[in-house]
Image: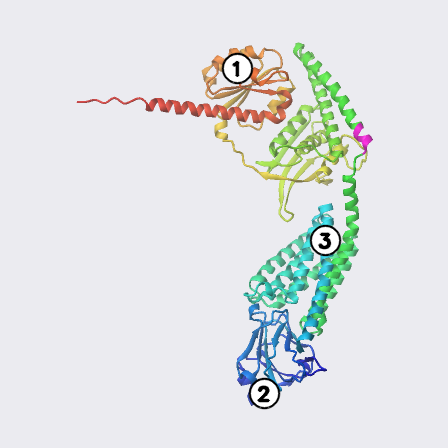
Amino acid sequence: MDDTHDAINIGQNGDYFIDETGTLTLKDVMSDAYSKQFRPLNKEYLQFGFVKGNIWMRNDIAIRTTSNTPSLLEINSHRLQYLDIYLPSLYDNQVQAELGSARPYSNRLVKASNYIFPIPANTPPVFTLYVKLSSSLPINTQIELKTLSTWSQDTQSNLTLTGILIGVLLTLFIFNVFFFIRTAHPMYLMYGTLLVGIVILHLSIHDQVAQFFPSYRHVQERIYNLAALLCLCAIVFFSRLYLDNRTYLPKLDKVLLAISSINALFAVVFMIAPEKIHIMTLSLMMIATLIILMIHAIVAFNYKVPFSGYYLTARLTLCIGYFAWILSVYGIAPSLLLLQWGLTVTIIIEAMIHFTGMIAQTSSLLQRSTRDMAYPDTVETELLSDVSARLRRQNNIIHGALSHFEKMTVTQEGKNILEDSLVANNNIQDLVKRIDLINTIKEDIGPKQTHPELLDHIIDKAYNNAQRLDQNSAVIELHTQQTDHIEILQHTRVLQSLIEGLIQECKHFTDQTLTLNITRREVNREGITQLELSVFPLPSHVGLANSSVDMGVYYLTQLIHHMKGEIQIYNQNKARNINVTLPIRARIRPSEKDITTHTLFDLVLFGQEDHDLQKALGLLQSRTNKIEHFTTLEGLLDHFEVPTKRTTGTITLIFDNGGHIPHITQQKLLPLMRHEDQCLLITDNVKMSLDYAKKLGFDELLYCADLDNQLNQQLNRLIQKAERLVQKDKQLKKTNLSSINPTTNTP
């Protein structure tokens, strides 16, 4: 090397010898017996492939530069595990540098991505350099002698190109985050994971990660294996979401899920113990996965799955680029440029093709999001509000009149007509609630929810309301699975109205039974909780093909879309089924009440059979307490007077709905009540205050309008209060007994 040649490739002038035993030392190699076995290299880029043993390289070097610029030996072989450098002309058989990926990064004399060995300044005019290479991976290397300035320029060029590639990935990542925020589609989450994986993979290929773990061995190989397989997992998961496999290719979806799980498992194994499994296993896994993804792309394109053309183009690009890169790794197609940059550039091109397809998909998603966020049609909103207000006023008048006639009607025929009128009035009231709810949804604000609510309570209220609104004596069977102790955190009012609507709209007008199955499922691979509602068999008049705007099926579909759910009708066992899938925000909250204790208290309802009392009975069906109902004061007093009927405490619910005067009833009942017994007054008189009710002798007050939301809460509080009184009485008796001094007999 002189002033005109500032970089010399060792491969063009050096010799090499392969020690298959791996036991020879430098002294052995320099002996006459082995020095004659060295063969010329005559290659700029050295690809030895898999080599058993050690590779010894020898080169005579003469440095004749006039300047004092330091000279460096650069070995560009990032996956080389062991690298030893000898200068016998200066240091005899002593090794001068022990480098390689199987050794800590702190061993490096110069902290750089390539292996750098500074040539000592006191070398003779001509000296011999020995380099020993060893690795269980394919050995691909380029060894050059450079001046410090030349090495700095080359390093700067490589870092600049790396920065450009990472800049492209960063740009894609920023756009990806924007689209994910706007659409909340998990596809963009997987795409972002893929972009991050590409960056880590590129840095590991160029050995720019080991510097962060200077004391660990095999860092480059561990990070490369992990990044490569995790990128593959991200591509597989992205493929499932990109083509919506669950809808279009459900069988292949399961295959891809299994493949991604296997790759994730091997990613951990290769990271923890890279030396335990042969590198060919990793390559075969990646090749097999890419082949399956290619088959997946062809099948999707053949079935004309939306956006499958972009996907097929991306798969072809990745397969061609990866197979060209793998040929360079194993020395079949020698190319240092392809080895260092081919895989990264290929995956970036593939990612850009996917990004183009995602823009096409996102245009529809963004338009949908924009429509959802747009200000609602003022005319439609005001119309719904006005109709709701007008109906509510008339409903209040009709309800007041019917309540008045209910107290005056004595004949059975009149009671039947009045009962039918009350049910019809309830349906008008339900229609008002539907209009209010659909109007709230169209304004995109949704009904407010102040506290979580148990899923079983929501289902019970919906079922009881549907029965209260039924005018055809419909037969309904309700089955639930995995709904115990589940609290719903969002959309409780919408969910209850949806269940009520499904029962009302799908019921049969004959004696045929309508079955409603409600099941909670944990979708582990998606990380969400789903609620499945299945209704069957469907009447012939129910369908989704009709696009008319009504308060029936159209109303139900609006509720489902508001909850970001899906609805479909399909045939099973010669019967039509409707299936609704809803993602829900829920949590498990075991019941805090002690059932064995609460069942010690009976529930007694006193009042006429009107819609409020029927509603209360429906709400209490899920409780384990014994429930009794009395319509006459004589029967109620008889229940309290007979000792055999009073083996437990009692929580009495007195309805102010005609037939008696509440405070007189309470005056007659109070002397017969135990110390722990509680009494709840339920009235529709909003002028009644809690303080006044307590002066009359009642423990709590509940308005009829609050039955749905507060009845069970009020009962829980009264039962807890009764339990405390029972415990207090027990402690008092125990204290009185212990205060009695036993008598002692003195002799």
Q: Earlier in the sequence, mark 2 or mark 3?
A: 2
What's the residue at 23%, 23% (across, down)?
Answer: 744
Nearest the viewer among 261 and 661 is 661
Instruction: Identify whether 722 is placed above or below 78.
Output: above
Please, what secondary structure does the residue beneath circle 2 have? helix
Which residue range is magenta in the image? 377-382
- Distance CA(mark 3)–CA(mark 1): 68 Å
What's the residue at 76%, 25% (across, down)?
Answer: 388
Residue 116 in percent (x, y) is at 62, 74
Q: Residue furthest left?
A: 747
Instruction: Identify whether 629 is placed above or below 89.
Output: above
Q: Nearer the viewer, mark 2 or mark 3?
A: 3
Mark 1 surroundings within 10 Å by alpha-carbon count, few (fewer than 14), some (14 through 19), many (20 or more): some
In the picture of the structure, the residue carrying the numbered disc 2 is 35
Could you tell me the amino acid type at mark 2? Ser
Q: Are marks 1 and 2 in contact (CB under 8 Å)?
A: no
Nearest the viewer among 314 and 206 is 206
Q: Earlier in the sequence, mark 3 or mark 1?
A: 3
Could you tell me the amino acid type at mark 1? Gly
Instruction: Identify whether 290 is placed above or below 650.
Output: below
Which numbered dot is residue 697?
A: 1
Give the quadrant of residue 230. bottom right
Nearest the viewer among 316 and 440 is 440
Mark 3 surroundings within 10 Å by alpha-carbon count, few (fewer than 14), some (14 through 19), many (20 or more): few
